[in-house]
């Protein structure tokens, strides 16, 4: 038997990222009734036993129902069974907790008193709904049963009481159908087939055309079908109906789709769902009845307008089902001005009470308005920003509260183009990959980087389509409008590079068969050549045929306001990872306070540089290497001048060469031949050198500072370029503030040696340039090797700053190659061995502990040590929150994630 | 300027592995005179200021000279300048510490008083020697100057006083030569050329044929040469001579060869060398004088006999130089019975005093015996064992002391064949590699594993010669008498596998050019084909031409005695790593108390198994995989029955499949073709599968428990085989005690899932076999992922035991691929960035901290958690000491290292 998520959560000692456990939300293992011992909380016009802050115990819906009652809103009375009961049910091996049904029976008696109706008997039978409701909203995930309490006997009473036979039997057939499906797992189709048969029999087209007699017969057929599939009669004891329905809700918590939903939405830390039992009200009791859903503001734009729809003489499910077209809620005024006015009143009450935009459900039964649900409404990024700013202006909420509420991840929508939802509806999705870098891109297909470069330069919009990308592809990647790969994960080369640029990218679309030679891509029996046009959605991973219309949102004044507020509260600095002046400039516009990571390796791929780089690598003596490096120096200097100029006055952390040298050599025979011809050496020599430099595990190989230890001249060239660029800038009154970062340090001795070499080079250049001004260039290191994290007390003696390279730190702490993880990561997520991809959200328990240890030890040695993070996690909300907690000085992320990081940093500081 | 080793040692906060710092040995940075303020310690017949336990301060030689004086032995008087002075000299930028020469002058005055001679004047001039002497003996590493105090003036006085002009000028020319060479860096050849000229002039063949006049002229030429090369006159002020000589000794501490020697011999934790200034005595004053060296016991066999050599009318250097043939010390009786008797007396005094075999130097000046040095004598492994046992029998030392003293590493010599030293002298060494696995092997050359198998089966003794080995080569490796590779380091595949078997292996012999196709090996212009015979020495890395005679030591009774004693004191258990019944049996003979690691992957390479394995890997459905696995089951079961039987009554830890599946597939086209034919599939399919399984970083890829998560059926087959084998054994009254070990766990969730699957399988097999006996099979995990070490509190909840896989833990903690490390490791050692290869001796500060953290956290959760280590470090002495300190329950190592581990464990327990 698999452990339940609740058990997993508890046993692994983790707290959910989205929900914090509170004392009242944590049941004692030996006491299913929890700390207070209460299993059931009633609510109704006469008052509520529950409170709004008991979401963990009562679920969001239950807590809000109780709360709405407390503030005097018209809510049908009912009661909530606690989430602890669900947990006890699961942990007890799917057995109803002792005493629960007795408590339910007592609550039902109270409900009968409150409504003046009787459950399962009498001439005014009480009907109830049973709904699930966890602490976090999971729409569509949990099951609902309506009209419980109807039996062969009470259906007659209901018909009598309402004077509406049709209504009564319609309610009854809905109950049997729902109950059979949800509680007893009877396929919906068998009921559907019966309905169709009846419809044919009565020559009815729509459900509503079936006469009362047909519905009576339908109920009979439904009961027969029920008996056939369930093996027993549809229960005529309402309390039995109730018990089975409650159990079904409990079970549904651990249904596959619920588990998957929670995993996909990263909902952890919950123990189960609550169950809400509530007196039924009916919107389908005639033309004076109705039902609707609404938002207190426009969830798409954020505009302050009451926004929703209603249907007359209908039940909630009819609105959702889309069979009849609902009417805008403004039109309600004409139908029932009183109800409309009351609704507007309630809208204001709710916003003032919840201090947020609400998503409500309501029903009007014979002219009386009932609120069935309220919850914070989902909204687009744009709406979130506007609502936040408006509500502050309206005096409803404080800046702090407004900031806290904006879902940081949604800001991406504001910064990147996206396909217009309408256009996307008709699009043909041919495959799906991983949404590696958000955005929308349409183009023809280039199957090699060279082809992409050529055609892009000729003005064509191309998608670069590769099995996987390598640093050799960088120019083509840069010129393409989007990148699509068939292998690789969220942190593959393509993904990382694309995210860095804010370029749309979909990776790991395994169904694609790419034939580079034939220049074509096959999927699902279809083939696409270089002239085919595809569109890729980097936010969803969809790959679609043809061009799809895009919308490019503009940064609004409200957005700037939010950012200004965020900056006011956050403690964490926000820098960017940028390798070019263009990226640096863009990031600065987004509010980056410096560059936390400039990778220098990308600089060696452009044009002629790669030739000089290759000459350097193929050199057989230090002298030849120095000659080749000398020809690279002017390029590097120019690069740095450009970046320093763009970041005038702000710090720029330059990382010295990091990747293994073989990444710069061509692997394909054709390219090797070309290189041999260019350099005038036999191709065999090139091949030998490639073979010699080959590594079994390049990630763990001769790279990072290990290059600088063995080839001091590379470090010297790079430091020379940095210092010469700095001096050149300063002489032009540009305030260049370089910081030199030495990568992949595992031992203090490495940093000690390289720091000295760096300092010597700085002094040498200063002397050669006769520069007399101040040249205080901090020298620091990346902490990306577990050993370095542990030995940070020692390493800090030679470091002016630390910057966590959490990508490599994650690779090494887990022993996961991010290039190879896709062979098992899907299984790990599916089997809940991992909750999230640790390359997306930092693993706080393991990798995070290394970060924490390193921080503590480094600062113990050197209290003024500046500590930042420049891995991919620097732009991930949950990770940024963690880095705030650990007390880092700054995070550094892709330019496009800078606003997100600023917001999250503020949210984290606000607690 | 590079940091001095002393600075490095201090600044990195490390303690040397061979020498512990004591309070008196640690100078204060601001006080060059150290804690006591004393710079110089005198010794002589009138008493000693130093003590034997002040080795760190006075060096080994100085402390022992002081000590010998204290116990009344005849030692020429002198004084010792402390190691702190050397440290102060170095740290002061090679400047003589303030006040030192004043202290030296005072000590010289005392020495003059003691000897009744005058330094640099008078008719009885005092001559002194200046010798280095660190706390650890470094023979040949530090420089010595004799006869200091001779000048143009005092040489005349010496001649007068001794009545021996020849002697006086011979002493003077030796001084100028030594002083010029050692202190002033004048090449020895320029002096040699002068000597040759004089010899020709006087028609002398040997040095001793040169008449006095010739020596007088020689002194003149030497002074001329000295002036020419040094730029100034040979100093005529004896105090100046002394000062320069002392400085030279200080400087020599940081000479390249000294640094290299210390690194090679892993001597760390020392701050410098002491300097011993001692009155000269002369063995070359005539036929009543002489000099010699001796051991108090035979250093080769350990026999209790006085063992040494002496020369009449000679100085110490003459014995070493080997120009004249010295006579065995027993013959001294005939020459001077009194001196001989006194020497025997002193021998006993020394052994009783130092409680160890001594290596002594002595000089007889005109019939008077002087002791110049005593130190613990170096000895072979066999001698170490015999001396230890004998000395306990003789009542000289306790078992504890005897155990503590045996150099554990030397036991290897007793367990493996080696080339006889005599035969090796004449051997032609064609190349050198890394001494990966000790022993000696001679054979013809096989260039593929297949060839090795074929020829070995036909009875030929072959060396397997490969660029590098892979798991496919295992059978050939096993059947070869030795393994030689041109690439790879001490922990490459070849090295690890060979050490596991105790098979001789030399790796990384980079000079070898191997042409597999042409079946030949070229080196230094010579070529060797398949019929050539080479010999390889796995203890030195030498590769030699032809067959060389071998000696195979037998395990003596003394050895068994030592092991018995070791077992009495050690607290650490000692298990072995063994994959076959033969290995298991051998390890048991060596005293292994169980198997700490049975790798199951090697089992899949033999004969038909690899075919089934490949079928399994190529299977496209779980069903096909299960079919292939089913055919592997009987093999596995048989393997386990064999091992359980060999280890009857002892625990056997079986590690489930660990390597990535692609390691089992053939990479070469020919083999792929063959496999395709065998399996009846197109070769393209095989190639596709190989390409699909290819990983960029296999070390960090789909392996270890990740295989078991994604392919549960592999785990099920292996566990089934283990349980069936256990039941089969138990039914035959064989006490099988398997322990199931799950590799590469990084998260508790992995172990939790796999433990459940393992338990379910155990129960399934038990039920199927209707076995009713006890089947308590512990289930544990390897800790080899840094994250697992940090999360050990959680992981321990699902583990009955932990076993540290320190190879992988080292790879991940450092981010080093042990397969690729050779591209930079030599640079790292050379530049002292690393002190030792962390794959040989565990890195206590980094990897060790992970071990410590894991141990603490694991045991905090589960106090009865059994914790061992099964990485390569399990057989390394310094590592075993560390594991004892951390408090592990056992180490597991190669069978041949079991005795070493037993001894070191005892030594560690004895403190």
Image (spheres, coloured by chain):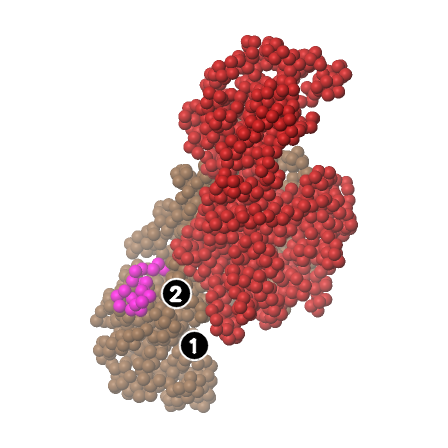
Chain colours: A brown, B red
Res A212 visible: yes
Q: Quadrant of residue B177?
A: top right
Q: Nearer the viewer, residue B229 or A425?
A: B229
- The residue at which mark 1 appears reads as A323
- The residue at which mark 2 appears reads as A6
Query: Residue B789: x, y in percent?
Result: 46, 52
Q: Nearer the viewer, residue A393 or A244?
A: A244
Task: Give, as a single range, the part of the protein colored magenta.
Answer: A17-37
Q: Is residue A44 above or below residue A639?
A: below
Query: Residue A763: x, y in percent?
Result: 53, 29
Chain to which the residue tagged by mark 2 belongs: A
Cα gap from disc 1 to disc 2, whole angstroms: 39 Å
Tell me what residue is drawn at x 51 percent, y 13 percent: B116
> Mark 1 packing: few (<14 Cα in 10 Å), some, or many (20+)?
few
Q: Nearer the viewer, residue B115 or A755?
A: B115
Upstream in sequence: badge 1 or badge 2: 2
Compared across the picture, whether A762 is left or right of A255 comes to right
Query: Residue A315: x, y in percent?
Result: 36, 77
């Amino acid at each position: 038997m698999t452990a339940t998520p609740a058990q997993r959560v508890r046993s692994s000692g983790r707290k959910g990222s989205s929900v914090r456990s509170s004392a009242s939300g944590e049941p004692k293992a030996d006491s299913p009734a929890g700390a207070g011992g209460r299993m059931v909380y009633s609510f109704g016009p006469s008052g509520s036993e529950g409170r709004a802050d008991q979401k963990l115990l009562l679920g969001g819906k239950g807590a809000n129902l109780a709360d709405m009652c407390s503030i005097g809103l018209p809510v049908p009375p009912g009661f909530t069974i606690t989430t602890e009961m669900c947990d006890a049910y699961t942990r007890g091996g799917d057995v109803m907790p002792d005493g629960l049904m007795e408590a339910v029976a007592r609550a039902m008696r109270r409900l009968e008193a409150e409504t003046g109706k009787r459950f399962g008997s009498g001439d005014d039978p009480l009907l109830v709904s049973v709904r699930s409701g966890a602490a976090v909203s999971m729409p569509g995930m949990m099951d609902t049963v309506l009209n419980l309490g109807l039996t062969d006997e009470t259906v007659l009473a209901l018909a009598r009481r309402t004077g509406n036979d049709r209504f009564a039997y319609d309610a009854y057939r809905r109950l049997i159908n729902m109950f059979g499906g949800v509680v007893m797992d009877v396929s919906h189709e068998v009921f559907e087939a019966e309905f169709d048969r009846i419809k044919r029999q009565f020559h009815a087209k729509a459900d509503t055309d079936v006469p009362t007699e047909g519905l009576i017969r339908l109920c009979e057929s439904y009961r027969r079908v029920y008996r056939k599939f369930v093996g027993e009669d549809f229960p005529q004891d309402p309390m039995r109906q109730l018990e089975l329905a409650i159990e079904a809700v409990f079970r549904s918590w651990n249904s596959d789709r619920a588990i998957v939903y929670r995993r996909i939405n990263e909902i952890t830390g919950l123990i189960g769902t609550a169950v809400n039992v509530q007196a039924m009200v009916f919107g389908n009791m005639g033309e004076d009845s109705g039902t609707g859903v609404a938002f207190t503001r426009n969830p798409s734009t954020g505009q302050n307008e009451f926004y929703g729809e209603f249907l007359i003489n209908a039940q909630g499910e009819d609105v959702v089902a889309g069979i009849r077209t609902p009417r805008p809620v403004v039109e309600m005024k004409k139908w029932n001005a009183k109800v409309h006015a009351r609704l507007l009143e309630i809208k204001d009450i709710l916003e003032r009470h919840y201090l947020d935009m609400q998503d409500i459900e309501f029903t009007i039964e014979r002219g009386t308005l009932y609120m069935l649900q309220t919850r914070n409404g989902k909204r687009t990024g744009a709406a979130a920003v506007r609502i936040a700013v408006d509500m502050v202006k309206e005096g409803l909420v404080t800046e702090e509260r407004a900031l806290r509420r904006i879902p940081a991840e949604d800001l991406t929508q504001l910064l990147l183009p996206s396909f217009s939802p309408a256009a996307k509806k008709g699009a043909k999705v041919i495959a799906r990959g991983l949404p590696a870098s958000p955005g929308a891109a349409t183009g023809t297909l280039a199957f090699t980087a060279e082809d992409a470069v050529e055609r892009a330069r000729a003005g064509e919009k191309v998608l670069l389509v590769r099995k996987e990308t390598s640093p050799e592809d960088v120019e083509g990647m840069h010129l393409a409008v989007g990148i699509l790969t068939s292998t690789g994960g969220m942190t593959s080369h393509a993904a990382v590079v694309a995210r860095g640029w804010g370029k749309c990218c979909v990776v790991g679309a395994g169904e694609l068969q790419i034939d580079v030679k034939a220049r074509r891509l096959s999927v699902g029996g279809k083939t696409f050549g270089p002239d085919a046009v595809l569109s890729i959605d980097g936010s969803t991973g969809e790959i679609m045929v043809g061009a799809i219309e895009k919308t490019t949102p503009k940064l609004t004044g409200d957005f700037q306001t939010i950012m200004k507020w965020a900056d006011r509260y956050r403690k964490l600095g926000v820098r960017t990872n940028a390798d070019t002046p263009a990226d640096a400039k863009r990031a600065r516009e987004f509010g980056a306070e410096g560059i936390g990571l400039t990778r220098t390796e990308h600089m060696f791929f452009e044009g002629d540089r790669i030739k000089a780089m290759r000459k350097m690598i193929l050199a057989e003596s230090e002298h030849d290497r120095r000659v080749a490096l000398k020809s690279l120096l002017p390029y590097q200097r120019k690069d740095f001048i450009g970046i320093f100029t763009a970041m005038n006055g702000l710090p720029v952390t330059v990382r010295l060469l990091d990747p293994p040298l073989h990444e710069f050599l061509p692997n394909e025979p054709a390219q090797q031949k070309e290189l041999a011809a260019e350099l005038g050496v036999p191709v065999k020599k090139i091949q030998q050198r490639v073979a010699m430099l080959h590594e079994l595990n390049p990630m763990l190989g001769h790279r990072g500072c290990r290059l600088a230890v063995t080839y001091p001249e590379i470090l010297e060239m790079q430091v020379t370029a940095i210092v010469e660029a700095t001096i050149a800038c300063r002489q032009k009154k540009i305030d260049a503030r370089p910081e030199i970062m030495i990568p992949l340090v595992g031992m203090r001795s490495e940093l000690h040696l390289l720091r000295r070499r760096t300092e010597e080079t700085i002094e040498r250049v200063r002397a050669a340039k006769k520069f007399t001004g101040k040249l205080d260039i901090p020298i620091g290191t990346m902490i990306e090797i577990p050993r370095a994290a542990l030995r940070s007390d020692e390493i800090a003696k030679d470091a002016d700053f630390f910057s966590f390279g959490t990508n490599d730190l994650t690779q090494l702490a887990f022993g996961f190659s991010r290039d190879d993880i896709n062979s098992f990561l899907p299984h790990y997520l599916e089997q809940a061995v991992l909750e999230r991809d640790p390359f997306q959200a930092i693993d706080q328990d393991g990798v995070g502990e290394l970060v924490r240890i390193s921080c503590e030890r480094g600062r113990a040695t050197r209290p003024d040590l500046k500590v930042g993070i420049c891995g991919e996690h620097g732009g991930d909300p949950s990770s940024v929150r963690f880095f705030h907690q650990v007390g880092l000085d700054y995070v550094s992320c892709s330019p496009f994630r800078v606003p997100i990081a600023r917001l999250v940093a503020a949210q984290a500081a606000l607690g």
